[in-house]
Amino acid sequence: EESKVEGLRAGADDYLVKPFSAPELLARVESNLKMARVRRESEAVLQRYRLLSEKADDVDSQCVLRHILRRDLRPGQLR
């Protein structure tokens, strides 16, 4: 328990304690790959928003950009 907490506090995304089963390992790998994909997608949307927002020179344009951002991101992606 203590080593798991220590690993997570050090920045690990996950921590697997021995002994572990192959199905558990596969499930954790799949989960981490899915989260990595969601992070990449979120970052791409945020980068697009940042580039567009640099060109938005009025309040109406900024409102439209916020709407686009909310539409493109799934709940929980914007943090």
Image (spheres, grey):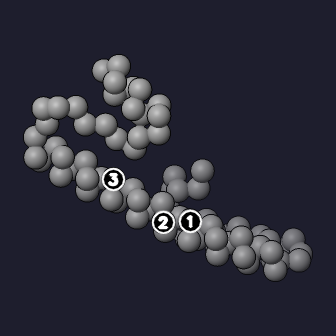
Vertical placement of 48 versus 30: above or below?
Answer: below
Q: How many marks?
A: 3
Q: CA distance from mark 1 to mark 2?
A: 5 Å
Element at badge 2?
A: helix
- Neighbours of disc 1 within 10 Å: few (<14), some (14-19), many (20+): some
**Which residue shows up at 41% across the image and 40% down it?**
12
Badge 1 is on which residue?
A: 43
Q: Is residue 67 left or right of residue 44?
A: right
Q: Are marks 1 and 2 in contact (CB under 8 Å)?
A: yes
Task: Residue 25 in the image: state x and y as whole percent.
Answer: 18, 46
Q: Indicate which disc, 2 or 3, sits on the residue closer to the N terminus.
A: 3
* Mark 2, residue position: 40
Q: Quadrant of residue 2?
A: top left
- x, y percentage for residue 38? 44, 62
Q: Which amino acid type is marked by label 2?
A: Arg
Residue type (three-letter) at the residue carrying disc 1: Glu
Spot occupied by residue 19 in the image (x, y as percentages of width and height): 12, 32
- Dot 3 or dot 1, earlier in sequence: 3
Q: Split into 4 quadrants, where in the image is the N terminus? A: top left
Q: Which residue is mark 3?
A: 32
